[in-house]
Image (tube, helix red, strand yellow):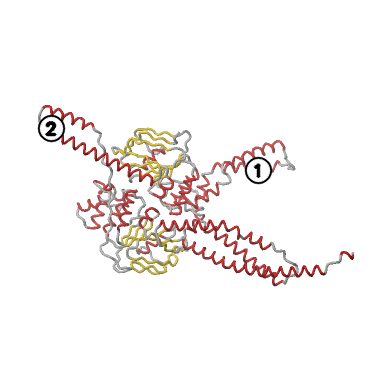
Amino acid sequence: MPLLEVSNLTKYYGANLILEQISFQIDPGTKTGLIGPNGCGKTTLLNIIEGREDYDSGRITFQTGLQLGYLTQEPQFSEGLTVEGEMLAVFADLRALADQISAIEHAMGDLSPGAANADHDQLSALMDKYSNLRERFERQGGYEYRPRIRSVLNGLGLPKDFWDRQTSSLSGGEKTRLSLARLLLSEPDLLLLDEPTNYLDIQAVEWLEHFMKDYRGAVLAVSHDRYFLDRIAQGILEMEDHHITSYAGNYSSYLLQRQQLIQSWEKAYSLQQKEISRQEKMIRESRETEKAKKEAASRQKRLDLVQRLEKPPGEQDGIRLKFGAAHRSGKRVLEVENLTKAFDSRQILKTISFALHAGDKIALLGPNGSGKTTLLRILMGDLVADDGRVRWGHAVTTGYYSQEQPDLNLSGTPFEEILNTRGFDNLAARNHLALFQFKGDDVFKRVEDLSGGERRRLALAKLVLDKANFLILDEPTNHLDLRSIEALENALTAYEGTLLFVSHDRYFVNKVAQRLLLLSPEGHITPFEGKYEDYQNWLAEQKEALAAAKKEAPVSSASQSQQKLRQLRRPKKVSQRTLEALASVEAEIASLEERRTEIAELLCTPEVYQDYLESQKLTDEDQEAVARLQQLYDQWSELTTEVEASNVSQSARNVSKSPDLDRQ
């Protein structure tokens, strides 16, 4: 039986049709992606399923006892709780059970044999209850819930220094991550997720993907993250023109099926149009006889009864983007030398240096809070660096796309924004806005009333008019639907200027960026020559090599090294100097082997193996340790040989001095 079944669901907002006769089902344990243009009704559908909104007709059926969890874009938290307190509240029943167990332990102590008020029968009853509660506590995960809390919070980018903070002090993105963490820990039968990868960095998204693969419940997720949909989705629901279409498989499978569907649709539409044209021509050319008139009328009736196919969607349905530069820049576009920036006592950027040349297309990647936006703002002059230098090349003109769009006038309209930007006449302004899906009365909406996606499209519409030869973009895909993202990808790929951008959309990064700048949490920057896919392959090779190294590690582990070293039975009469030298060598060997084990473990953690600079640093240290160990083992061999020789000599002396048993 399905967890959820939606049948012929219809929804209006006033006179505006949103959903028309849509039907689908969600089965236990399945992961389904929900996609479609902004404003098509995806969030509305989730709200209806969760019970936050009514619908006009149709039916929604839930499996009996279904537990539903919903991640909204506006999370709410209990008043006065810390981050850790909010997570612990998920396990209130387990914590109450732990309190019962603790109370029984104290009671049993008071009734134990030898106590003044010992009562055997009462103690026996308490012990039975205690045993049952302990078994129940263990069965329900009582010993694992705190490690689970730590794992989920760390995975979603909320490390330990967040846990004592009040939830009210968190930023919007941090609240979204906390809400997602709370939801994942509650383990509902069906998760409804509205853009779960928003406000997650790449590392956190990859953690979420792994979590979703192992999650036993079902998931219905609205997302524009194509890698995410490829890796977790077993089915895709596409919303378009008030209807919904179901596809089996992940996002890549959906693309192939949709292409085949549209090709069949186009063929059927073309054939029908040809037949309609042929019939209409025959009707027009019918002779003016009574018989011909009757045949024409009959033919027209049959034609009127034909169910006309809708025109298939085409490329013109998305936004149309083209970036151009008014003039070329010099060969060297930008030089950053030893740039440093701190906020209060926290160092964000540490003496970073890099250079960009004309035509470069570079993605700046790093965890949330590592300073990516800070760096872009310094380049644009919105922030001042503490130290270092930024040097611009000849004839460089910049176009900046920020996450906040501060240059938009909230009290104005899209129409006014474009008129004021380029000095267009009314018709030219409307035509330009139409390229970005602002049509009809939409051009006269107040900017403050626009959705996040609409503001993004308006900012792009203005950016195109800058004709800059160097574009700096901060999370340009946020709040854009898939078609708009694809249009942006194509435009930036064709762009002949220089590009530096921040994005957590891995598909977008891989398609647009030619190379990467990797910003670590410690504030260091490392260039990577190659596309994002090349970087992922490099990481996979690193993990594979480290896994192989870990398999070999036990052979040279600290404990086994110590065991080998102790196999030698030292004689009593060896020079003190030799013994001290041997002990020193053994201690250094043990220390280095222990450090190699630590390095192997560190290199297998995402924080390190995704940090190219730190990974290389630890790898170099490990290689130095291997070289030093070889020297130490040579010394150890020489010293043990000396000890063994001394042992043989001592044994010979002992034999010569032993009593003659025959004489006794």
Say left or right for 285 vs 458: left
Q: Residue at x 13, y 32 (%)?
A: 286
Residue 428 percent across, percent down from the top left: 20, 53
Residue positioned 65% across, 66% down in the render: 586
Q: Which residue is mark 2?
A: 286
Does residue 253 lie above or below 635 as drawn?
above
Q: Secondary structure at mark 1?
A: helix
Q: How many marks?
A: 2
Quarter holding the C terminus is: bottom right
Q: Residue at x 85, y 66 (%)?
A: 659
Which residue is label 1 attached to? 105
Say if residue 413 shows up in the picture: no
Q: Farthest left residue? A: 288
Nearer-the-camera pick, 86 or 221: 221
Of residues 188 and 318, the one drawn nearer to the viewer in this rendering: 318
Q: Are marks 2 and 1 in contact (CB under 8 Å)?
A: no
- Residue 364 at what x, y percent from top left? 40, 60
Which quarter shows the N terminus? top left
Type of amino acid at the residue the image marks with label 2:
Ser
**On the rendered structure, is 494 left or right of 103?**
left
- Please identify, in this view, whether the residue under mark 2 or under mark 1 is nearer the observer: 2
Outermost residue, front side:
662
Q: Percent from the top left, x then y, of residue 352? A: 42, 66
Q: Quadrant of residue 492?
A: bottom left
What element does badge 2 sit on? Answer: loop
Q: Is residue 614 above or below residue 122?
A: below
Callout 1, which amino acid?
A: Glu
Distance between the Cα atoms at labels 2 and 1?
100 Å
How packed mark 1 is, by other alpha carbons closer than 10 Å (few <14, some 14-19, many 20 or more), is some
Point out residue 631 in the picture as x, y percentages from the top left corner.
60, 69
Q: Is residue 643 visible?
A: yes
